[in-house]
Image (cartoon, helix red, strand yellow):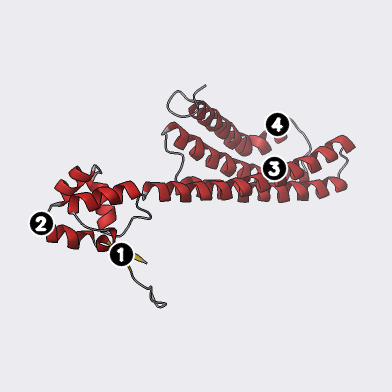
Amino acid sequence: MKIRGNHGIGNYLKIFLQICKIFGILLLIFLIPILFLLKLPFDMFLFMIYPCGICFLMLMEQFIGLFNSLKENNPFHYHNLDRILKAMHMSFMISVFVLISFFLTFFYDYSLAFVVSILFISILFFGVGIALYILSDLFRSSLEYKEENELTI
Amino acid sequence: MIIVNLDVMMAKRKISSNELAEKIGITNANLSILKNNKGKAIRFSTLERICEVLDCNPGDILEYKKEDANE
């Protein structure tokens, strides 16, 4: 299956993420009205969805840019290195916010499975952040090789 | 640092950039990179063709210059 180009998987993933981003923005906007309408209780823990959600939307934005460069057949560019680094920062921030949420769950009556899963998400995003850090270093060295190759006459 | 004195040799041989690029078999853009010392490396094959066309030695084209600490 093709990865790059207009009919590549990169372009389809980009479209998918753009749709997810729109739904994410709508969810963040209408979360409180929905909770009010459904008369569901909301606590401090629920408000942690906002910083996590905003960071996640920014993380998605970076991946949209990455997949867009795949679509345009120009993935090896310094813009993409910046995007990977931004995505790494967002992952670490989500990890921290989810960890704060984990501690907040102690003040409310949440099931143990839910609390454990919150901790798992925090560890997961921390892992993603580390993976992105390694990937950014690999990407940087590949960019250096590319530049050297291009300037070898 | 290594300085490429290609333009000096080209002037001596009275050859234009376009003509040299065509005879070596590289693009004008790449020859310009080489002339302006923007290149990172030069292939032996390219150097060989340049020497062949300009009838010179690699030492006539390449020069080593000590970099100043202030630069």
Same chain for the residues at labels 4 and 2, yes or no? no
Question: Residue at the spot x=18%, y=60% of the render?
Answer: B9
Distance of mark 3 from mark 4, alpha carbons? Answer: 18 Å
Residue located beneath label 3 in the image: A49
Counting every numbered tag in the picture gives: 4
Q: Residue at x 16, y 57 (%)?
A: B10
* Image: A108 above or below B71: above
| Label 1 sits on residue | B3
Q: Are marks 1 and 2 in contact (CB under 8 Å)?
A: no
In the figure, residue A31 lies in which quadrant? top right
Q: CA distance from mark 1 to mark 3?
A: 58 Å
Are marks 1 and 3 in one subunit? no
Please, which chain is the residue tagged with disc 4 on?
A: A
Q: CA distance from mark 4 to mark 2?
A: 85 Å
> What secondary structure is found at the residue carrying circle 4?
helix
> Which disc number belongs to residue B14?
2
The three-letter amino acid code for the residue at tag 4 is Leu
The x, y position of residue A24, in whole percent, is 60, 35
Residue ID for mark 4: A37
Q: Nearer the viewer, mark 4 or mark 1?
A: 1
**CA separation, marks 4 and 1?**
74 Å
Give, as a three-letter code, the residue at label 3. Answer: Ile
Residue closest to the eye, A14 or B3 = B3
Q: Amino acid at mark 2?
A: Lys
Q: Amino acid at mark 1?
A: Ile
Question: Chain under label 1?
Answer: B
